[in-house]
Amino acid sequence: MLVLFDIDGTLLKSRGVGLRAMQAALEELHPPRHPGDTHDVEAIDTAGRLDPLIWRELLEQRGIEATEEGHEAFRRNYGDRMHSMIEAERPVICLDGAAEAVAWVRDHPGLIAALLTGNYPETGRLKVAGAGIDPDDFAFGVWGFEADTRRGLPPIGIARAGEHLGRPLKPEEAVIVGDTPADIDCARAAGCPVIAVATGRFSTDELAPHDPDELLEDLSDLERFTSALERCLGSLDP
């Protein structure tokens, strides 16, 4: 069985380093035409969004055409900027209980720990490592560039887990752990159970109407998290 962890707001907080690195990368590649003319990253709702879609929206703000070559240049520049910022600032903090929850899933013989995120792999891994979690604790990742919408990500994770296990995996055997309504929505669309945690921008009161299978304040209580997993997946025996 599979546990797919979101990154931002679920496992860690990065004090805006992603958005700042994204803005710096864009302004290097597309310098402002006039003083004060910048990419307004703060005006974009990034919760649960895929990084390539955020990039496209930022280009639209400036009337710049999105191309594959431009996307590749942005990814390289964005990754370099984030690496430098994380090295210099150490802005990433691991949320309470997140490392322990990941380690518990990683070490459980009947479970696969994986990532499901809107990040690119190079920047997502930087954030995870910055939080003190080994990115290689996860069997694989499902990344924001791999689908057109977040709803397209869970089926990729389910297929990869099936390859890992050597047998097809049913959607109900894959639980998504996330902190936004978008995490709940993509789980529902794929037929997966979902554990929502109120460690990001959304409170339990804001997440509850989206009807997650389990709703936790945070991951600080490992026993509560593992009990929620068991209710979502049934027996956790191998």
Image: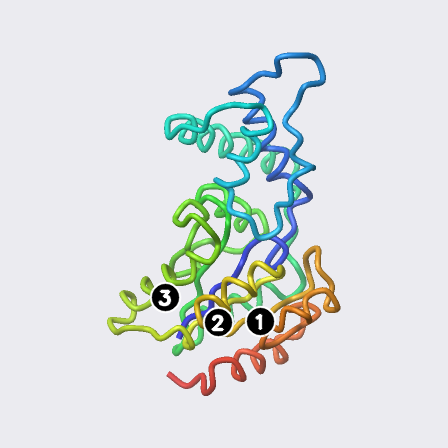
Amino acid at pointer 1: Ile
Q: In the rendered view, would you say 125 is above or below 166?
A: above
Identified by mark 3, the residue type is Ile
Q: CA distance from mark 1 to mark 3?
A: 17 Å
User: Which x, y percent locates residue 122?
Assistant: 45, 42
| Marks 2 and 3 close (CB-CB < 8 Å) | no
Can you tell which mark lies on residue 175? 2
Decide which of 143, 83 is in the foreground and name it: 143
Q: Earlier in the sequence, mark 2 or mark 3?
A: 3
Compared to 123, does 2 lie above or below? Answer: below
How dense is the environment of label 2, judged by Cα within 10 Å: few (below 14), some, or many (20 and up)? many
Distance of mark 1 from mark 2, alpha carbons? 7 Å
Q: Residue shown at 28%/73% (left/top)?
A: 168
Q: Amino acid at mark 2?
A: Val
Marks 2/3: CA distance? 10 Å
Relative to residue 53, is residue 37 depicted above or below? above
Is the Cβ of the residue at disc 1 closer than 8 Å to that at disc 2? yes
Q: Is residue 184 left or right of residue 189?
A: right
Q: Which mark is residue 195?
A: 1
Question: For residue 215, which quarter of the picture?
Answer: bottom right
The residue singled out by tag 3 in the image is 158
Mark 1 neighbour class, 10 Å CA radius: few under 14, some 14 to 19, many 20 or more? many
Q: Secondary structure at mark 1?
A: strand
Residue 99: image location, x then y, percent = 57, 63
